[in-house]
Image (cartoon, grey):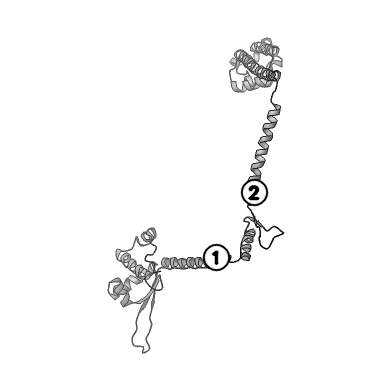
Amino acid sequence: MGKNPAFLFYPNDWMRDLEEHPLEIEGAWIRICCKLWWSETKGSLARTLEQWSKILRVSEMDAERILKYLGSWHIANVTFSLPVTEDNKKVTVEVTVESRRMTKDEKNRKMNMLRQRRFKEKRKSNAPASEMDAEKTLKYPRFWHMPNVTFPLPVTEDNKKVTVESRRMTKDEKNRKMNMLQQRQFKEKRKSNAPVTEESQRFSVSVSKKRKILKRKTLAHFDLFWKAYPKKKSKGQAEKAWSKIKPDQTLLQTILKAIDQNKQSAQWQKDNGQYIPHPATWLNAKGWEDEIATQGDASSWQAP
């Protein structure tokens, strides 16, 4: 396989890192990145100033200026060294430039390749080559909470039977059968409790009719109470209180009579009925059983 023809390019990082720098620096850096990619030590390259000037197509003085700029602004890691020859006469300046991002990506790529190679080698070495290896492979999932694998005894030499069980599937099947059994029992119980004679059917129908009639009668009695009561407040709460009481005809007459008497009382007439209790409050407190203060007792009554 040949050399990877492309390297990862991050537009957001590129614009953020080079947005405030001259276009000359941006152009020089992209040329350096391309050269770093094709170097043997991908992401890092050491060259003399003369060589860097040819790569950047500028003079050695400008190349040195650009490289120092890249290093000072931490765009790249730039290192200047001074290797000396044996005769101590010729001195050559060598500059090493490194792209941190490219070096990191190359390191990750090599780590992934190594990991994949190890996985393939391990998988190849663990491949079952015999009946004994196949048996080990079947037993292996038990240690990793995979399917239950059992080897029933006795086992003949020529025909070995292996039982593989999925715990989740076994549990789901058990729950399904339990649900079916519960549904069957419920239907049988419902069927056994159903009315089987015409008399029982008529009885059940009569009970439901009586409940409906009682409900209509209760609502009709409530309408009479609501019309008679002087303060029309919180009708819903009053209906709930009335449904709890469920007064018959005798109690209804007692309540209506008590309302008429309270209308003549000093408490209910004071300040245009300001002290008349809400209907729900009056019903819950069984106000029809209270003593009624007539208008002649107004001098002895005091507002709460």
- Determine if residue 80 is in view: yes
Amino acid type indicated by mark 1: Arg
23 left or right of 182 in image = left
Using a 10 Å C-alpha cutoff, classify the residue at mark 1 as few (fewer than 14 neighbours), some (14 to 19) or many (20 or more): few
Furthest toward the top, the residue is 296
Residue toward you, 181 or 44: 181
- The residue that mark 1 highlights is 123
Which quadrant of the structure image shows residue 68?
bottom left
Q: In which quarter of the image is the C terminus?
A: top right
- The residue that mark 2 highlights is 170
Q: At x 64% / y 61%, what residue is drawn? A: 139
Q: Distance between the residues labelled 1 and 2?
A: 30 Å
Which quadrant of the structure image shows residue 283?
top right
Nearer-N-terminus badge (1/2): 1
User: Which structural element holds mark 1?
Assistant: helix
User: Which structural element holds mark 2?
Assistant: helix
Using a 10 Å C-alpha cutoff, classify the residue at mark 2 as few (fewer than 14 neighbours), some (14 to 19) or many (20 or more): few
Circle number at residue 26: none
Furthest toward the bottom, the residue is 87
- Determine if residue 304 is in view: no
Q: At x 53% / y 65%, what residue is drawn? A: 119
Residue toward you, 281 or 24: 24
Residue toward you, 304 or 224: 224
Which quadrant of the structure image shows residue 143?
bottom right
2 left or right of 227 in image = left
